[in-house]
Image: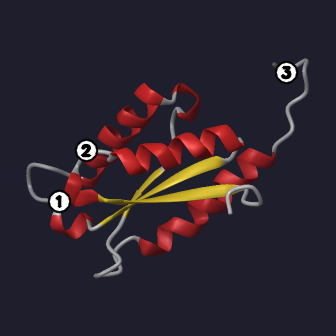
Amino acid sequence: SMKVADVAVLVLDAEARMLQRQELAIADAVVREGRSLVVAANKMDLLVDEEYSARDYATAVQEQIEIRFPMLRRTPVVPMSSLTGENVHRLMPVVFDARDRWQQIISTGML
């Protein structure tokens, strides 16, 4: 449940190339609950070629999220493939980093 989570991981099907309605609803719930968000872009092995890179996809997803949810600016996107195992090892360090940033306490003076 998101009420007890520090970080929500939104797993996307990269083949869709765009955030779907269900994924946007989940991102909205993350915002309403005040949680940190990490995006795991799965199936990148089916999408990436010479003309389209994982970075292109990550940038496109970040832009889609920022347009709808400005407070989620610079949401980390981890392009990966659970089938081949490519970049799966990068997900948890990003989640832990997001948790650490979420738990930071910033004094009023610094705001």
For disc 1, the neighbor class at 10 Å (few under 14, some 14 to 19, many from 20) is some
Q: Residue at x 20, y 59 (%)?
A: 15
Q: Residue furthest bottom?
A: 84
Q: Quadrant of the N terminus?
A: bottom right
The residue labelled by disc 1 is: 48
User: Residue 105, position in %: x, y?
Assistant: 87, 38
Q: Which residue is mark 2?
A: 56
Check disc 2 and give the amino acid type: Asp
**In the rendered image, which residue does mark 3 sit on?**
110
Question: x%, y% of residue 40?
Answer: 43, 60
Q: Position of residue 101 (x, y in %)?
A: 72, 46
Q: Is residue 107 rendered to the left or right of residue 44?
A: right
* Dot placed on the residue nearer the N-terminal end, 2 or 3: 2
Please state which of residues 54 and 30 is positioned toward the viewer in this rendering.
30
Gap in angstroms between the C-alphas marked 1 and 3 = 42 Å
Q: Amino acid at mark 3?
A: Met
The quarter of the rendered structure image containing the C terminus is top right
Colour setup of the view: secondary structure
